[in-house]
Amino acid sequence: MSGPVFRRNLVAVVLGLLLIGLPGPAGADDLAPSELVERMRAAFERVQDYTCRLIERNFRRPDEFSESDYAFKKPHFIKLVGRVGRSKGAVVVLGRDGKTSLRKNGFPIPTFLVREELRDFARSDFGSLIEEIEQMLQAGAEAAVTLRGDAYLLRLAQGNRVRLYVVDAQVNLPIELLETVDGQRVSLTEWRDLRLDVGLTEAAFQP
């Protein structure tokens, strides 16, 4: 995975490309957007489970920063344990029955209070993210891919909204997603310390 220095440099490049609205000079190893998405889909299909440290920032509401331990296992088990920020003390699990349960500091939270958040959580895995990218491409989003160091930058633009996905070129899975509107940063999601096929069992996905 990328080191701290590379990550800082990469974020600077990302911001620069977003602000000028261009993919930057092409490299010999650049891919067509559809080819990169195919690589991402193939990589996800090979993976049986993964863990990471999920970090989410909302630049419009800085108090919504969160950092969580995230785990996924096929066919569709998800568990998030909040460590810092707004998710601290929360344990969210998507179990075998396809229903999401949420507890915070040991107490269940009524589903009707967090319906939208739970729906987003149920589609927070890499498979759902790739499906979302495919849907954006099918809807006519402007797309460009550029190779920068050990990552691909996939830029998708729809009107005044731009999403820039940083995809690790070795594992072909995303490590960052920066979203802007009218050139202003809206949100940043990071998948740090990504580990693939760690051997998670179903028992790990208990509320």
Image (cartoon, helix red, strand yellow):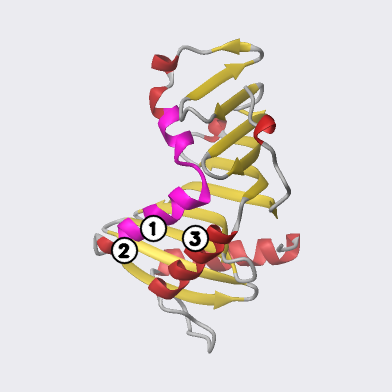
Where does label 2 land, which residue? 137
Mark 2 residue type:
Leu
- The structure residue drawn at horizontal position 52% and vertical position 31%, both measured from the top left corner, is 96
Asked whether residue 184 is in view, the answer is no
The quarter of the image holding the C terminus is: top right
Mark whose residue sits in front, 2 or 3: 2
SS at circle 3:
strand
Give the spatial CA distance, label 3 vs label 1.
Answer: 10 Å
Marks 3 & 1, CB-CB < 8 Å contact: yes
Where does label 3 land, which residue? 165
Q: Is residue 137 above or below residue 63?
A: below
Q: Image quarter for residue 176?
A: bottom right
Q: Is residue 89 above or below residue 175?
A: above
Mark 3 residue type:
Tyr
Mark 1 residue type:
Ile
Asked whether residue 96 is in view, the answer is yes
- The structure residue drawn at horizontal position 47% and vertical position 78%, both measured from the top left corner, is 24
Magenta stretch, residue numbers: 117-136
Neighbours of disc 2 within 10 Å: few (<14), some (14-19), many (20+): some
Which residue lies most toward the bottom here?
Answer: 28
Give the spatial CA distance, label 1 vs label 2.
Answer: 6 Å
On whether residue 191 falls in the magenta region, the answer is no
SS at circle 2:
helix
Residue 147 drawn at (x, y percent): 55, 77
Q: Is residue 113 above or below residue 122?
A: above
Mark whose residue sits in front, 3 or 1: 1
Where does label 1 land, which residue? 133
Q: Image quarter for residue 53?
A: top right
Q: Main structural element of the magenta stretch: helix, strand or loop?
A: helix
